[in-house]
Image (cartoon, rainbow, N blue to C red):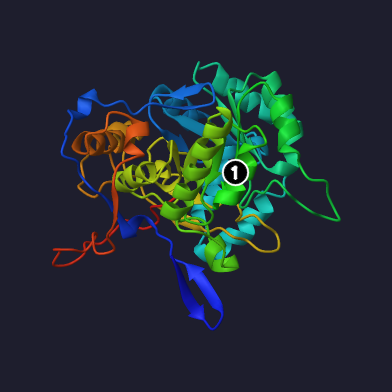
């Protein structure tokens, strides 16, 4: 539906997580009989949750624990882990300074060159644990770092930037060919981020096995405020899921849709999958794990931009162990612990046995859902998004 926003100018009505609800079914299923596994190419995950490639969220320790618990953590090959041998000391500096000092400090820290020997070292540290290993790179370094990742046996390679498009024009640099990269690398490639049907469809035609959907919804990302760009996640995911289904119907190739950012609670994750996602990528909730490198802080990937930072440092605090965040038991009633349990209970309540069935559940427009019948709103945790 398009609405008039001025004389001769219309805009489409779009929706975010707080504006919809999942309708229950006439059938209910025992949550223990539901299956929340998913796949990205030939990479199978027991739970459809990825930890964002952000320096306050994922280091080797967190990646190994995430893998052992059945999810997947993505290590940023352009972050402090590959610039500094003692990355923990660098992160301690970032978390210790004031809010006024943090952006200049991050900009200074990220001027240190990336070291290929540290890329190999970090990958080997994860590989020796036996878990599925995933790493990310910007398009600028994708071919070079992708080759290293392939040599070291990485299982999934992510190419990520704030907004990804297949067509790129520049007088200063050559565009990355995702088709060439996918053909060159032996592992599945995930690319992002995008937020429209058209961009998702074009990315799928390059041969990627997954796309990241979400521009600016995360708590540590200020892209929407700085650039005014973004599409609310429910609509962005639903449009990308339509592209996925049409692409699959046309050629039999299935590309996973990964909702990236903006999810604070188990209910948000359920809504993302109900909107069509095959998996979710989250940052803030994972940064609250005791095992996370940021000690309850994390910061946007574009914070280090020298000219126009589009990220901020967020204090989430310690929520619990990673196992408690993913599987409980929950010690709070705000939806920030036991994401897998929330998803299985939602599926059981709606009579859906697996992720594909939950993608077909009825969704209703419900902007009053968070406040209906509530005398007053309880104080919410700050910074719970990607």
- When the figure is inspected, residue 355 is found, relative to residue 186, above or below; the finding is below
Residue 349 in which image quadrant: top left
Q: How many marks?
A: 1
- Residue position for label 1: 201
- Extreme bottom residue here? 7
Q: Position of residue 180 (x, y in %)?
A: 76, 32
Say which element carries label 1: helix
- Residue in the picture at 34% in, 47% down: 271
Q: Residues within 10 Å of mark 1 (few under 14, many from 20)?
A: many
- Residue 239 seen anywhere in this rendered image of the structure: yes
In the rendered image, residue 337, in percent from the top left (x then y), is placed at 28, 41
Classify residue 369 by image quadrant. Answer: bottom left
- Relative horizontal placement of residue 167, taking residue 192 as reference (left or right): right
Comparing 235 with 261, the one in front is: 235
Image coordinates for residue 316, horizontal then vertical, percent:
39, 51
> Which of the two residues, 356 or 67, is positioned nearer the viewer here?
356
Position of the N terminus, as image quadrant, is bottom left
Q: Is residue 57 in sight in this rendering?
A: no
Outermost residue, right side: 171
Residue at 32 percent across and 29 percent down: it is 354
Question: Where residue 235 sits: x, y (%)?
Answer: 44, 54
Identify the residue shown where x is 46% and y is 35%.
Answer: 50
From the viewer's side, name the closer residue of 303 and 89. 303
Q: Is residue 176 left or right of residue 317?
A: right
């Amino acid at each position: 539906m398009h609405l008039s926003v001025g004389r001769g100018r219309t805009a489409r009505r779009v929706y975010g997580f707080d504006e919809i609800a999942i309708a229950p079914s006439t059938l209910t299923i025992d949550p223990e009989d539901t299956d929340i596994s998913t796949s990205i190419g030939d990479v199978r995950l027991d739970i459809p949750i990825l930890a964002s490639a952000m320096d306050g969220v994922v280091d080797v320790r967190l990646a190994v624990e995430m893998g052992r618990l059945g999810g997947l953590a993505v290590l940023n090959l352009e972050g402090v882990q590959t610039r500094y041998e003692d990355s923990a000391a660098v992160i301690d500096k970032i978390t210790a300074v004031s809010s006024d000092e943090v952006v200049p400090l991050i900009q200074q820290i990220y001027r240190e060159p990336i070291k290929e020997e540290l890329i190999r070292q970090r990958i080997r540290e994860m590989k020796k644990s036996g878990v599925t290993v995933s790493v990310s790179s910007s398009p600028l370094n994708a071919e070079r770092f992708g080759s290293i990742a392939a040599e070291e046996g990485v299982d999934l390679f992510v190419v990520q930037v704030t907004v990804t498009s297949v067509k790129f024009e520049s007088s200063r640099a050559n565009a990355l060919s995702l088709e060439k990269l996918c053909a060159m690398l032996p592992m599945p490639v995930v690319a992002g981020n995008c937020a429209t049907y058209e961009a998702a469809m074009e990315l799928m035609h390059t041969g990627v096995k997954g796309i990241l959907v979400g521009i600016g919804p995360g708590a540590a990302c200020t892209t929407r405020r700085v650039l005014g760009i973004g599409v609310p996640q429910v609509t962005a995911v639903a449009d990308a899921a339509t592209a996925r289904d049409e692409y699959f119907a046309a050629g039999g190739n299935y590309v996973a849709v990964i909702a990236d950012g903006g999810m604070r609670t188990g209910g948000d994750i359920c809504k993302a999958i109900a909107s069509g996602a095959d998996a979710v990528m989250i940052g803030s909730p994972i940064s609250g794990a005791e095992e996370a490198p940021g000690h309850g802080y994390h910061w946007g990937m574009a914070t280090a931009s020298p000219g126009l930072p589009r990220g901020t440092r967020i204090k989430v605090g310690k929520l619990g162990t990673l196992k408690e965040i993913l599987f409980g038991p929950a010690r709070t009633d705000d939806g920030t612990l036991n994401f897998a349990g929330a998803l299985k209970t939602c599926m059981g309540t709606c009579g859906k046995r697996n992720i594909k069935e939950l993608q077909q559940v009825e969704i209703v427009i419900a902007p009053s859902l968070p406040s209906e019948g509530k005398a007053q709103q309880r104080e919410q945790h700050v910074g719970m998004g990607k």
